[in-house]
Amino acid sequence: MAFVRIARLDEIRPGFRRVVRAGREEILALECDGDLRLVSNRCPHQGFPLAQGGVNGQSLVCPRHGFRFSLEDGRCFQSACRLDLFVPAYDGQWVGVDLRD
């Protein structure tokens, strides 16, 4: 799979949040403390969409059951499950994700 655009760099501001599909992945892009974080949009615990979850510091909270996930390493604070993280890729004025097989 090639580079999938998420947003122009000038769109990434406090509060930025967007869900994009990249192949089989649904990725949630969040601005958090000046950084762009890319995570799976599915809770690894029960598969619930995380796009409506709250951000508390460097944690994303599942809106279904309140599990908190670290946006730095994906670990869950309440269980052994782990959130998938993706590395932002850049192409000129665009930020996206590159999921090469």
Image: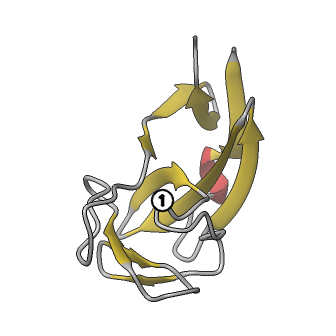
Which quadrant does the N terminus fall into? top right
Secondary structure of the residue carrying numbered label 1: loop
- Name the residue beneath numbered marker 1: 44
In percent of the image, x 30 and y 72: which residue is there?
Answer: 58
Q: Position of residue 68 (x, y in %)?
A: 35, 78
Q: Nearer the viewer, residue 99 or 10?
A: 99
In percent of the image, x 25 and y 52: which residue is there?
Answer: 73
Count of number-bearing discs: 1
Q: Quadrant of residue 24?
A: top right
Q: Quadrant of residue 100?
A: top right
Horizontal side, residue 66 vs residue 78: left or right: right
Q: State the residue lying farthest toward the top.
A: 101
The scheme the figure's colours follow is secondary structure
Q: Is residue 24 above or below residue 54?
A: above
Q: Nearer the viewer, residue 64 or 97?
A: 64
Q: Quadrant of residue 5?
A: top right
What's the residue type where badge 1 is placed? Pro
Q: Position of residue 15 (x, y in %)?
A: 57, 77
In percent of the image, x 27 and y 56: which residue is there?
Answer: 72
In percent of the image, x 50 and y 52: which residue is there?
Answer: 39
Which quadrant does the C terminus fall into? top right
Q: Position of residue 46 (x, y in %)?
A: 55, 68
Horizontal side, residue 35 vs residue 12: left or right: left
Judge the density around disc 1: few (<14), some (14-19), many (≥20) Cα neighbours within 10 Å: some
Horizontal side, residue 31 vs residue 42: left or right: left
Q: Is residue 53 above or below residue 58?
A: below
Q: Is residue 9 above or below residue 34?
A: above
Q: Position of residue 42 (x, y in %)?
A: 59, 60
